[in-house]
Image: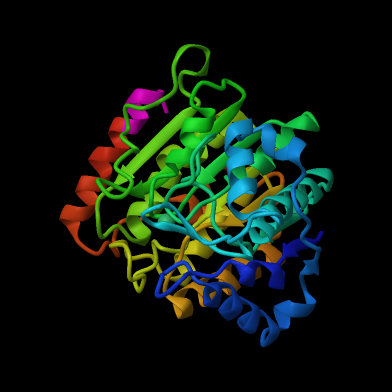
Amino acid sequence: MATFVCIDDVFLRHRPHGEHPERPERLSSIQRALELSDLRDRVRRIAARPATSEELLRIHTPDYVHDLERRMGPNAATASGWMDPDTYYGPGSYDAALNAAGGAIEVALRVLRGQKDNGFALIRPPGHHASRGRAMGFCLLNNIAIAAAAARQEGARVAIVDIDVHHGNGTEEIFLGDPDLLFISTHQYPFYPGTGAAMVMGAGMASGTTINVPLPQGSGGPEYRLAFARVVLPALRRYAPDLILVSAGFDTHARDPLAGMSLVEDDYAVLIRMMLDVQPRLAMVLEGGYSLEALSQSVMVALQTLVEYTPPAANAPAGSAQNSDHSDESSSRGLLEEARLNVAEVQRIHHL
Ligand SMILES: [Zn+2]
């Protein structure tokens, strides 16, 4: 069993023009933490590589891919500007973005081809707000969608679970009409980018393949475990994917400066193990997380969880202790009750 990790200096070359939360230090703090940890020798490092045009065009429109190349590609005169009020680019952004998508593909395909391997693409810029034809919310290319498309090219049945604090509106939009991919998002709601209501569930043949789990501000371990036990895991079991891709944002952390959730490092370990119990072929793709300390520590806990994971014995009863939704340590009874109502609504909509 191996844990594949893609982390590369090329991702440091995407630099803001001034102060910005999505900055190279996010990744260098993870690199530093990894170098200081024994995990350094326990993961299998794989190289990043630029995604090809063919790989990009499975998800993004030709117009958008050309626009990115024109603005920031190797022949751009001055690669510097903004794609939207939040999303900067500079001279190193094109290489970083192409390698982020390529790194996500490489991790996903290694995990898919193994039996019990898992992995983590530690990449930036993030991707889940980017739609087929538009950059948004710090995201240029939708890395996880591009990785999912590459895995599907090999015949895999893919589920994406987005645990970033923000709704993965780009990923949702890309797959909303697609019956052959399950997209599940847990997110603070209402919050940026404004989407993510429970009633949005795909249409026609794709009805039910988008599952939004809006959670109240302040949600922590008990609320997330509830959402996972009652919605995320049953939906994953029902779909039975060959590969789970996780849009791994750590801006749900209690110390994150941009959002209002209250997860801590150990909560991520629990949530990751819950998903691994459904399908050990799990590849995480970094999205948000803006406290350098919380981000790097959470990523180390996530890597340790991946490295040390052992599947439960085949005859173990379903719903092990870690899958239960204990509520005794809830931050507040009212908060858990609110989350319970939201989750019940999602269960009702999706017959879970
Ligand atoms: Zn986010």
Q: Is residue 97 visible?
A: yes
Residue 343: give x, y in percent of width and height: 32, 39
The quadrant of the rendered image in which ligand 1 is seen is bottom left
Q: Is residue 38 above or below residue 126?
A: below
256 to the left or right of 286: left
244 to the left or right of 153: left
* Residue at image point 39% right, 45% down: 167
Q: Is residue 5 above or below residue 41?
A: above
Q: Is residue 312 visible?
A: no
Q: Is residue 85 above or below residue 37?
A: above
Q: Residue furthest top?
A: 204
Q: Which secondary structure class fits the magenta region best? A: helix
Is 348 in the magenta?
yes
Residue 87: give x, y in percent of width and height: 44, 56
The quarter of the displayed image where residue 251 is located: bottom left
Q: Residue furthest bottom?
A: 36
* Residue at image point 46% right, 46% down: 129
Q: Quadrant of the N terminus?
A: bottom right
Q: Which residues are magenta?
A: 346-352
Q: Nearer the viewer, residue 312 or 120?
A: 120
292 to the left or right of 2: left
* Residue at image point 51% right, 21% down: 177
